Amino acid sequence: MLPANERLRKSSVFQRAYTGRKNVNTRLVTLYVVPRAKSERKAPGANSSSLSYATRMPFVGFVAAKKVLKSAVARNRVKRRVREAYRLLTRSLRDGHSDSAGAAVEKSVQNTAICTESNSVSKPESAAKPKYKMGQWYVLVFVLHAAALEASWAEILKAVDECLNKAEHKYGVIRGGEPGGKPRE
């Protein structure tokens, strides 16, 4: 379960993410992102009690529309699975450990591969060492598609990882430049 200080609850902030029109898609998930204000993206000063740039986590929301997934049980199951995938992929950033997320993700994907007896399941490329710059995001909203209901755990994990990577490349701060813009030269 995500910590309470990372959960997105305000409907106005969900609407802000949707109207910002910064999104990336996969077959299973659409991710809407809202970057932090430029002044908030800067690393805090020498104050040791404040969180550093790398450890500030964004507010995260998960949406499964009733129109897409009719059953409340199905909507809640899919949201739990995507929430857990996100939590595993960002655990090392949250806890400050360098390899805990990679080990957990690798173990989870290996267990899935054993259960499905498929040799084609592999871990996500960046799962071993997640390099997400989560401090640059203010809000992340995952909108789940109907295909996520039938997806395996490995597919969901890969979709969440792919969304985070796409958002990083498409809208992230690139080498000190503006979010989504060209790098400074």
Image (cartoon, rainbow, N blue to C red):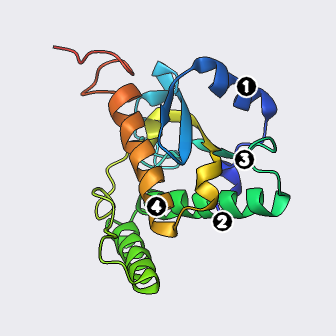
Q: Name the residue under label 4.
A: 155
Q: Callout 3: 10 Å neighbours few (<14), some, many (20+)? A: many
Q: Identify the mark nearer the N-term, 4 or 1.
A: 1
Q: Which residue is painted at 39% across and 84% down in the image?
A: 117
Q: Callout 2: 10 Å neighbours few (<14), some, many (20+)? A: few
Judged from the image, the secondary structure of the residue bearing numbered disc 3 is loop
Q: Identify the mark nearer the N-term, 4 or 3.
A: 3
Q: Do the residues labelled 4 and 1 touch (CB within 8 Å)?
A: no
Measured in 3D between alpha carbons, the distance from the residue under mark 4 to the one under mark 3, in whole angstroms, is: 17 Å
Quick check: 32 left or right of 48? right
Q: Callout 4: 10 Å neighbours few (<14), some, many (20+)? A: some
Q: Mark 1 points at which residue?
A: 15
Residue 66 is situated, as x and y percent measured from the top left of the image, at: 81, 45
Q: What residue type is labelled 4?
A: Glu
Measured in 3D between alpha carbons, the distance from the residue under mark 4 to the one under mark 1, in whole angstroms, is: 28 Å
Q: Name the residue under label 2.
A: 1
Which mark lies nearer to you, 4 or 1?
4
Please tell me in which quadrant of the rendered image residue 52 appears.
top left
